[in-house]
Image: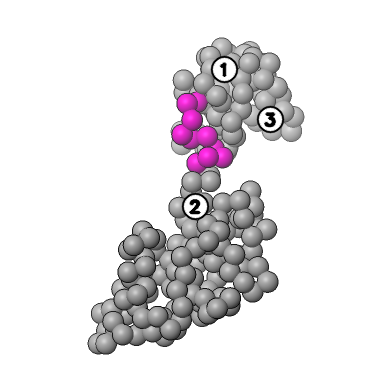
Amino acid sequence: MKIYKRMVRKPVTISPGANVLDALNLLHHNSIRHLPVVDGDNFTGFVSESDIRQVLLLPGGNEMKIEEVMNREPVTIGPEENLEEAAKLINHYKIGGLPVIEHDKLVGIITVGDILAAFIEIMGVLQASSRIDVVLGENPKAFESVSGIIKEEGGEIISVGMGNSEENDKKFYFFRLKKCDVGRIAESITVNGYEVISVIE
């Protein structure tokens, strides 16, 4: 999924000449934790709530300008990049959000919350669903075969993931399905020679 499909397109911004109290008020009023800093049409930096709170502890911190506090070279991402890349950057740099930049202009912002919401939607976690965990073994056509069995038995796959069994460290695939008679599907998978290790109605 591309960044532009999940980013906030018109983020709240602040100018480099504003002071830290202005920034704190903006953050609280809009219930956000990050502010892109723009000077006219130009993106100049990024400031977070934690940056501002650290400054407020300093003598005269209330009057400090955002340009003195902001990160002038923040990690950024483009709107055509994949959501997975944003997740990797956020995890690697231990940050809460990324300005989205195109042709040196701010076009949006993507945060941990936006990415989490997207992954929850993709995985179908909040939908009424069933789940089957299956060990596929080494057969390169096993995934295709099991997927076909599920469809033949009337199952509709929402998402697929991989995991390792805690008991024997076997790699398995979990198939999340729209709510269905998952027991019958699991039985058919087993009859076809695959190991079903878990079924969730």
Look at mark 3 in the image and give the residue it sits on.
143
How many labels, in total?
3
125 falls in the magenta region: yes
Identify the image quadrant of residue 174: top right
Residue 155 drawn at (x, y percent): 61, 20
Residue 114 appears in view? yes
Residue pointed to by mark 2 = 114
> Does the CB distance between marks 3 and 2 fall below 8 Å?
no
Q: Residues within 10 Å of mark 1 (few under 14, many from 20)?
A: many
Q: Residue at x 55, y 59 (%)?
A: 9
C-alpha distance separating marks 1 and 3:
14 Å
Task: Give the number of the mark in front: 2 or 1.
Answer: 2
Q: Which residues are magenta?
A: 120-129
What kind of residue is marked 2? Answer: Asp
> Please, what secondary structure does the residue beneath circle 2 have?
helix
Label 3 vs 2, first from the N-terminus: 2
Q: Say if 45 sits above or below 155 in the image.
A: below
Q: Earlier in the sequence, mark 1 or mark 3?
A: 3
Query: For mark 3, does the 10 Å Cα neighbourhood hold few (<14), some (14 to 19), or many (20 or more) residues?
Result: some
Q: Circle 1 sits in a helix, a strand or a loop, which is it?
A: helix
SS assignment at label 3: helix
Q: Amino acid at mark 1?
A: Ala
The residue nearer to you, when weighing 140 against 67, is: 67
Judged by depth in the image, the label closer to the viewer, 3 or 2, is: 2
Q: Which mark is residue 148?
A: none
Left or right of 187 in this view: 149: right
Q: How far is disc 3 from disc 2 in space, using C-alphas?
A: 30 Å
Judging by the rendered image, the residue that carries numbered circle 1 is 186
Check the image and report above or below for 169 versus 195.
Answer: below
**Whether residue 89 is situated above or below residue 190 in the rendered picture:** below
Quarter-of-image position of residue 188: top right
